[in-house]
Every structure is written in C-alpha cells, then in structure tokens.
Amino acid sequence: MAPVPPADPTPSPLPAPKPPWWRDRRVIPWVVQAVVGLLVLLLIAFLLGNLIRNLTAAGLLLSWRWLQQPAGFDISESVIPFNAQLPYWRALAAGLVNTIRAVLVGLVGATLLGTLVGMASFSHNGLLRRLARVYVEVVRNIPLLLQLVFWYFVVFLTLPNGLAAIQLPGVVLAKSGLYIVGLGEGLRWMGPTLVNGVWQAPVRLSVEFGALLTGLIVYSGAFIAEVVRGGIAAVPKGQWEAASSLGLSWFATLRRIVLPQSLRVIVPGLNTQYISLAKNSSLAVAVGYTDLYSVAETTLNQTGRAVEVVLVLLAAYLTLDLLISALMNGLNHLVQIRER
Amino acid sequence: MLWNRTRTLGASLLAAGLLAGCAGEDGGVQSQKLSTITGRGKLICGVEGKLPGFSFVGPDGKYLGLDVDVCKAVAAAVLGDPDKVEYRDLNSSERFAALASGEVDLLSRNTTMTLSRDAAGGNGLSFAPTTFYDGQGVLVPVASGLKDLKGLAGKPICVESGTTTELNLADRMREQNIPYTPLKFQTSDQTFAAYLGDRCVAVTSDRSQLAGKRTSFPKPDAHTLLPVVMSKEPLTPATTNGDPAWADAVRWIVFGLMQAEESGITQANVDAKLAEAKANTNQADLRRFLGVEGDFGKQLGLPPDFVVKAVKAVGNYGEIFDRNVGPASALKLDRGLNRQWKDGGLIYSPPFR
C-alpha cells in the first residue's frame, strides 16, 4: 500500500485506507480543471502582455480620446444627421445605424422570399417546383461577394440616369438611386423632381443600398428556402392526408396545418441564417455602401488606432448577433409544441 | 497542498516571464531588419500593384513602375541583385498594418507623407525622401462640360476610402461650401469601375494616379483633369520607426539615386565613372560617393559600392522618372516639381559627406 501522504496526516479510521490524493477520484477532476484553467489564463496573460508591450513600444497604447475628435469626412447617406465636423463616435454611430437598417430590411426580405420559395418546392406545379430548385442551387453555390459585385456593377450601374430614368407616378428609379414620393418641406407631398440634372425626392434609397439589399436578400433567401423546405418536410405526411380528407385546399393545408407545425424545426435554422446575414452585411464596402465596417475603415486610416477600432467593430457585430440570437431563442420557445 | 500550489504559481510566473522576454527582444546596435533581409535573401516590398507608371504588372508578368524601381534599387544596394524582391500588393487600408507588423520591409506605394503618419503617436512611420511630388486632382468626363469644383455641387464623387484624398476632398468642399456626396470604395479598381459606370460625375485622387489610370480606360481622351490642385501630396517610401538603422539605409539609397542624377551618373556610364574615380585620386567627392574611398556603406550597414549597384540596376532618379511616368511613358507627365533643385525643382540630395 502507498504511504500516507504528508498532506493528509490523520490516519483513516476506516478499515480500507483512503487512497493518496493523486489517486482520489474526487480530487483528480479538480486538479485537471485547475491546471487547464491556469494554462488558459497564462495564455491570455501572455497574449495580452505581448500586445500591451508591443503597443507601448510603438507608442500606441489603447486610448479612446480620438472618439471625441472631429471626423473630418462625410458619409454619403445617413439616417441620423451627420456632417464632417461631428466627432468620430457620431460617424461610427451613423455607420452602425446604416448597418442595422440594411440588416433589418434584409431579414424581412430574405424571410419572405425564403418562405415563398420553400413553399414553392412543395407545389403541385412542376415548373414552379423546378424553378425554386434552380434558384436555390444557383444562388447558394456562388460566393456572396461575387453576387454583390454583380448586382452593383452589372445590374444597378447600368440603369439609365437623368431624364432617361425609369419614371412611374411617385417613383423614379435612376442610376443614382430610388426616389419615392413623401412628405417634404412644410409637410407637403413632394414627388421626385429633376434639379440641375440630379433627382431629388423626400425618400431616397441609394443604388448602393439597393445592390447590398438585393444581394443579401437573394443570397440568404436561398438558404432560408432550404430551412423552410426542411421544416415542411419534417411534418408527417399523415397531416397532409388528414387535411385533404377534410377538404382543405393545398394553400389552406400549408397555412393552417403544416406551416404552424413546421415552425419548431424552422426557427432554430433561421437563427443561424439571420446571424450570417448580419455578418455578411459587412461586405457592403465592396459596393460603396457606408455601413459600420466602411466607416470604421476610414476611421482606422485617419486615426491609426487599429486595435481600438477593431475592438469597436468586434463589440458591435457581437452585440448585434447576440441580440438576434436572443430574440430568435425567445421565438423558438414560443413555437415549441406544448406537451400535455 | 498550499506549498504545492505556491510552487506551481511561481513556476508559471517564471515561465510567463521567460515567454514575455522573448517577445520584446532587441537586435542591438546592428539593424535587425537589415540582417533579416540579408538572411532571407530577398526584400519584401509593399506596392500598390495596379497603378500604371508607379507599380503594375507588365505584359511579361514582371512588376514595373517608379515605386517598383525604388524597391529594386534598395534590393540591389542591400543584396546586390535588383530581382531579389518579393512584391506584395497592398490597398490603402492594409498598407500601414502590413508595414507595422513587419509583413513588408519597405512600403513603396504612392503614400503621402503627413504628420500623423510620421509621428510616433500616430502611425509611427519613418519616411524616406519623397520620390514624387504630387497634388490631388479631379478627373471628369469631357462630355460633362465641368470646369471647376462648383460644378460638382450636389453630385456624387468617387473616392478611395482610407486615403488623404478623402479628407482633402471634404476640406476643400467645406471651405467653398459645396454640398456633395462622397462614394467610398475599398480599392482603386472598384473606385474607377464605379466612375466608368457613370455612378459618379467625377473621381478624385492624386493627379499622377488619375493620369496613370486614365491610360487604361477604354477611351482615355474622353476624360480630362480639372485644373484645380486640391492638396500637396508628397509621395514617399516609408519604413517603421522601430528600426532607425534600416530607415537610414533606405533614405540614403534613395538620396543616392537623386545625387547620381545631379552628378551626371547614369545607368550607361556608371562603370566608366567608377573606373574614372578609381584612376583619379583627386576626385574626392566622386570617390566617396561611389564607395572607392571612405566608409559610407559601412556606416549604413551596406556594401561600400551601394550607390553603384543601385544606379546600375535602375538608373538615376531622372532616368527612373522618364522611363516610368515621363515623356518615354504612356503617362507623359511633366517633371514639374520633380526637377532637380538646380533646375528649379524640389529634388535635392543632402551632401554625401
């Protein structure tokens, strides 16, 4: 038998002697966890120490004073008021709002498109079914960046400009953007007008925004269509048969019987797609849309504060994605089938 | 137990200290960068890569241009071979991070020297002598009939993000109270594609860059530079503040190219001049400049004849200018401010003493 360890000097009263601590099943897991935890802490300390040492050597220790300095650059479109005299944090905020705007509209659009296409793949109409398959297979197998560049340079930038623009009552689609009638100055309705060769209207969406949205919606829509198709396929066939024996039409069956049951399969899958969409929106810089990433990049180059700006970016995208995730988890909880 | 834990902690602190010690090691008196480059056997040079006249890939797949020739001159002076260069294409946003992280040894990428980029509390770069004095210009289609900045009011202007160009545009437009819409793109290719796609009525950048890019347009004659010069843009090669000895070596290699032009030493006659210097002991200036006499090379950590090697590889400053952007090139730029100081320009090498 092993000698009694010095850490445990009292002799055991039990007949079977207590094993030494390094063979004790209650102790070993703690030791292993402590060692692993210590190693992780050491690694973090080493990396952080290295970062701080090198930043200090380069005279670039973390500082946030630059956030208050005037940005000095303009932003082509901003929902919140912005001009070049305002500080950097306002510029970053304007970029964040632009990102959130693109993500929100993108989420709604991609969900609608994806649901319709997902439903279409169960249609009795063969043409519709095959079209849905072709759309999904083509779109999800081409990189998003390529698609964005295609939408922007090939589709939107070939729109006519000036007087030749596509004009409908209250709406004008030109190379410079989409102009929609709205409440102008003095709360009067104002339609799009051509001033000095440039279209003006109360509501204006740039082609950069349009190209980004189209790209995101078409791309994410394909993935969401697959998620919806999987969800519908997960509903037992008997539900379809029961519904049709009650005399419900195809659409009514889908809407009243199948889709509500498929939600519990669809929602977790949607969560992933929504998060991807939010992250993919940072590709906006390829098509000239001023999102958070674009503003951050300009800020980085003007201030030279690479680490701080990247930290801001990381925090913003992380928060956005965790928020989407939390909302979707809440929704998931609501659509789960209550077992009785 | 407690004793054990204390010992583990002590050992781990010691280990952390050792590991940390490795990270901040200093190379001593000798330049760490120079020994890295000679050890590696090649120079890694950051360039723009797609800019005719300055740095672009020619039809035979080799890099060409004024910025590229600076890389070649440095490689020739340090390693004795102008072809021992590995080029890295960097966009405006990547360039300083690539230099600071040591991914490139030298940034020769039409970069404007500014206070904040030079300052230790800013980007912390160390600038070599300016190789091209430029100014910011505006390119517009001839058909637009635009004559000045006022005509651009309310119209979209394409600009590359992360450049001084972007800030100058904002400043000039604010001064003159002209509202405009900046459309920012990440690369010069995207910027010019959007301009050629008529999304913008104008594109702004350094005048040399606009002239260079215009040569690759489908119809170069359909675009014209507005007469306005919006800024001073001294385009300058750069290294980091971290290695002053390496920065000095680059600085004096570039000055060497300028001094060579002033002294009438060309790629064609450099061998004859060297022979003349060796034969004639009275030509002290020439002997020192070409490394026959004195230890200038050694002081910089370079071979004694580094100027000879650089000039033999790419010619003197005037030859580099003429070949890449001057009359002999597609850009056909005037020497302008880039003449030697004796001819009323700004190219001025301090004495090799």
Image (cartoon, coloured by chain):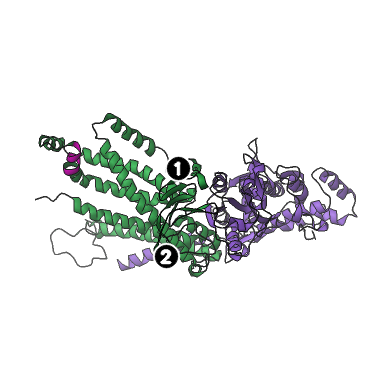
Query: Chain drawn purple, letter?
Result: B
The reply to whether residue B290 is in sight is no
Q: Chain of mark 1?
A: A
Q: Is residue B136 left or right of residue B343?
A: left
Quadrant where the N terminus of chain A lies? bottom left
> What span is in magenta?
A250-256
Type of amino acid under label 1:
Trp
Q: Is residue B31 left or right of residue A205?
A: right
Q: Are marks 1 and 2 in contact (CB under 8 Å)?
A: no
**Which image quadrant for residue A36?**
bottom left
Q: Which residue is mark 2?
A: A186
**Is the magenta region chiefly helix, strand or loop?**
helix
Q: Which residue is mark 1?
A: A151
Type of amino acid under label 2:
Gly
The reply to whether residue A317 is in sight is yes
Q: Earlier in the sequence, mark 1 or mark 2?
A: 1
Q: Is residue B348 left or right of residue A211?
A: right
Query: Chain drawn green, letter?
Result: A
Percent across and percent down for residue A229 are: 26, 39
Percent across and percent down for residue A225 are: 30, 41
Percent across and percent down for residue B76 are: 71, 46
Q: Nearer the viewer, residue B151 or A253?
A: B151
**Residue ranking furthest to the left:** A340
Local SS, label 1:
helix
